Amino acid sequence: MSGGEAIESSSRKPTHPEAKEGDDGFWRDADGSALPVSASDLERFTYCPMSWHLSKQGHSGQSEAIEQGKEVHQAIHDSIETMQKHRFRSRRNLLIWQWWFGVIVVLTIDTVAFQNADNIDFDTTEFSKLLAMASLSCLFVGIGAVFIPWRTMLGVGPMYPDQTVEEAQTLVDPIFEPVGFKGGWLEGGWVEAAMFISAIVLAIHAMALRFASNQDQAAFVLAVTTIGWMLLASVRLQRALISNHEAQVLAAKNDLATDTQVTYSDDDKSAQLLVDERTGLRGRPDQIVIIDGELIPVEQKTGKVPEKPHRSHTVQVLAYAALVDSTTGKTPPYCILRYGQENLHKVAWDEANQALLFDAVKSVQQTMANGGAARDHDRPGKCRHCSRRYACEDSLV
C-alpha cells in the first residue's frame, strides 16, 4: 500500500462509529449526547479536513507564526485584564470618594451649626453615649447586610441590572467584576454603604461631644475632622483619575471604545469553556465585549492581514456567536473578526450565517461518525502554508 493510500485509509477511520444522526441533523452518541465540536475544530476542518484530522491524531501545528500568535494572544489578554483592573479600581475609588464626600458635607454643616448655634441646653455626655450606641448599631447592621443574602431572601434587586444573575454566571466565572454590577441604589451596595457611613458620622459626632467641654471645642473637633476627611477623599479621587487614565490608554491600544466593557477574556487557563449541549458546540472566544448593551464575541487573528476574512475564520467566530446565544439567552446581532490593530470585520449573526455554521458542525460530526476526512482542494499554496504539512502524506508540496 502506498503512502497516499495509507493516509487515505487512516483518515477514513471514524472516531465515533456508534453515533447516529438525529432528526435535527446533528449527530449524537449512544448516550444521546451531541458529538463535541470545538470552534477550533471548525476552523481547521473548514481550512482542510486533513488538517483537522491530523490535529485529532495529535499533530500540533508547527510554525513560527503559530508561536508568535500565541505570544500576541497572551499579550492581548494580559493587556485587557490590566485594563479591566484599572477600570475596577477607578470605579471603586470614585464610589468611595462619593461616600466620603457625603461624610464631608454632613461634617461641614454640623461644624457651622455647632459654631453658630446658641448655648446647647442638654447633657452632651449622655447624648454622646446615645450617638455611640447608634453608631455601633449601624455598624453591626452593615456587617450583617454584607454577609447575609438578604436580597435573595426578600427578592429585591437585582444585583445585575443589565442581565439576570443566572445569565451572568452562565456566561463566565467572575474573573473580572460581574457584568453590569454598579454597587449602589438597591443593586447590591447602597444599603450597606449607608449603614457604614452612618456609623462613621455618628461615631465622629459622639467623640466631638464626649471630649469637648463646650460647643466651640466641639465645632473645632468637627472642623479638624472635616479637613482630614477632605485630604483622604482627595487621595481617593487622585487614585481614581490615575486608574481611569491607565484604562483609557490600554483601551486605545486594544481598539476599544472608552465605554466598552469586556466581560470575558480567554487565557487558555482560567476562562470558562462555553458549551451548547444541543449542537455539541464548545469553545472559548478571545473576548466577549458589551457594545450598546449587546454581548459581542471577538476573535483575534494574528499574522498576515487578508483582503477579506477567511471562510475558516468566519465559521470559527460564528461558533462563538452561537455559544454566546445559547449560553446567555442573549442573541448577539453580530460578532467581530479582528486582524491586527485596526482591521476589524463585523460578521452578522443572521439566518444565512447560522445555516453556514450549523452545516459545518454537522459535516464535522458526520466525519467523526463515518470517517472519510481527506484533502478537499488542489491548491499547492494552501498546503504550503499549512502548519501540519510536515505530517501529511497527501500534501501537494
Image: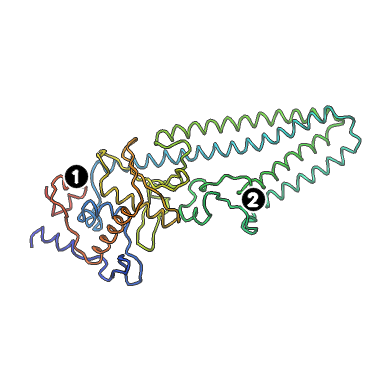
Q: Residue 83: x percent and y percent?
A: 46, 38
Decide which of tag 2 and tag 1 comes sooner along the chain.
Answer: 2
Which image quarter: residue 299? Answer: top left
Depicted 354 relative to depicted 29: above or below:
above
Q: Residue 192: x percent and y percent?
A: 66, 47
Q: Residue 179: x percent and y percent?
A: 51, 48
Q: Residue 35: x percent and y percent?
A: 32, 64
Horizontal relation, residue 224 to residue 22: left or right? right
Q: Which residue is mark 2?
A: 146
Q: Nearer the viewer, residue 115 or 217?
A: 115
Horizontal relation, residue 208 to residue 151: left or right? right
How far apart in space, not on screen, are marks 2 and 1 (Cα)? 57 Å
Residue 305 bears which disc, if any? Answer: none
Which image quarter: residue 230? Answer: top right
State the residue lying farthest toward the front: 351
Q: Nearer the viewer, residue 296 or 395?
A: 296
Q: Crowding near pointer 1: few (<14 within 10 Å), some, many (20+)?
A: few
Disc count in the image? 2
Q: Crowding near pointer 2: few (<14 within 10 Å), some, many (20+)?
A: some
Type of amino acid under label 1:
His
Residue at image position (61%, 49%) is: 188
**SS under mark 2:** helix
Depicted 240 relative to depicted 358: above or below:
above
**SS under mark 1:** loop
Depicted 63 relative to depicted 228: above or below:
below
Q: Which residue is mark 1?
A: 385
